[in-house]
């Protein structure tokens, strides 16, 4: 089974974007549809997540302004790939971190 690529970005208040793609080894043959369904079930408003909760690299710009810029990242997609793993985190660890996400906790942080 091919590896899995997780694509996401950070978009600041000025709509400047910083993209990233992480490739995870897939030794347990995780089904991409199952993974995407899990991810989407844990997103804020169907789009966003906190990268630190999922132990993913933070994509905020150096000149991040907490008065106008938000803290969450935007999920783009997951896909199968033949690219080599480029992250030390295992896919199992990512899935565990995603499963621990509770949207109601994130909702409080948005207020």
Image (tube, rainbow, N blue to C red):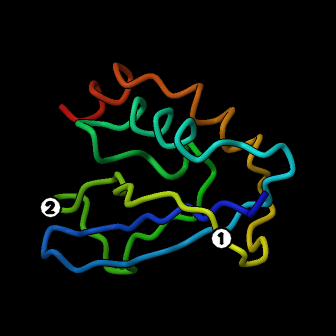
- Indicate whether 73 appears above or below 47: below
Q: Residue furthest front?
A: 1
Closest to the observer, 31 or 52: 31
Task: Give the residue drawn at x 81%, y 63%.
Answer: 88
Mark 2 is surrounded, within 10 Å at the Cα level, by few (under 14), some (14 to 19) or many (20 or more) other residues, namely few
Mark 1 is surrounded, within 10 Å at the Cα level, by few (under 14), some (14 to 19) or many (20 or more) other residues, namely some
Q: How many marks?
A: 2
Task: Give residue 68's mark.
Answer: 2
Residue that numbered label 1 is attached to: 81
Locate residue 104: give its quadrant: top left
Separation of residues labelled 2 and 1 (CA atoms): 36 Å
Residue 42: x and y in percent read: 42, 31
- Indicate whether 99 appears above or below 69: above
Residue 14 falls left or right of residue 64: left
Residue 6: x and y in percent read: 55, 61
Residue 38 falls left or right of residue 28: left
User: Considering the image in quadrants, where does the N terminus appear?
Assistant: bottom right
Task: Give the residue drawn at x 72%, y 75%.
Answer: 82
Residue 102 falls left or right of residue 48: right
Residue 14: x and y in percent read: 13, 76
Question: Is tag 2's residue or tag 1's residue first in the polypeptide sequence?
Answer: 2
User: Considering the image in quadrants, where does the C terminus appear?
Assistant: top left
């Amino acid at each position: 089974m091919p590896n899995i690529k997780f694509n996401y970005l950070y978009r600041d208040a000025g709509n400047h974007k910083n993209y990233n793609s992480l490739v995870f080894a897939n030794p347990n043959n995780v089904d991409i549809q199952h993974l995407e369904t899990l991810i989407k079930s844990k997103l804020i408003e169907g789009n966003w997540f906190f990268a630190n909760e999922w132990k993913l690299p933070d994509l905020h710009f150096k000149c991040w302004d907490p008065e106008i810029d938000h803290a969450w990242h935007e999920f783009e997609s997951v896909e199968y790939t033949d690219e080599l793993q480029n992250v030390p985190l295992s896919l199992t660890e990512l899935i565990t971190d995603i499963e621990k996400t509770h949207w109601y906790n994130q909702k409080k942080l948005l207020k």
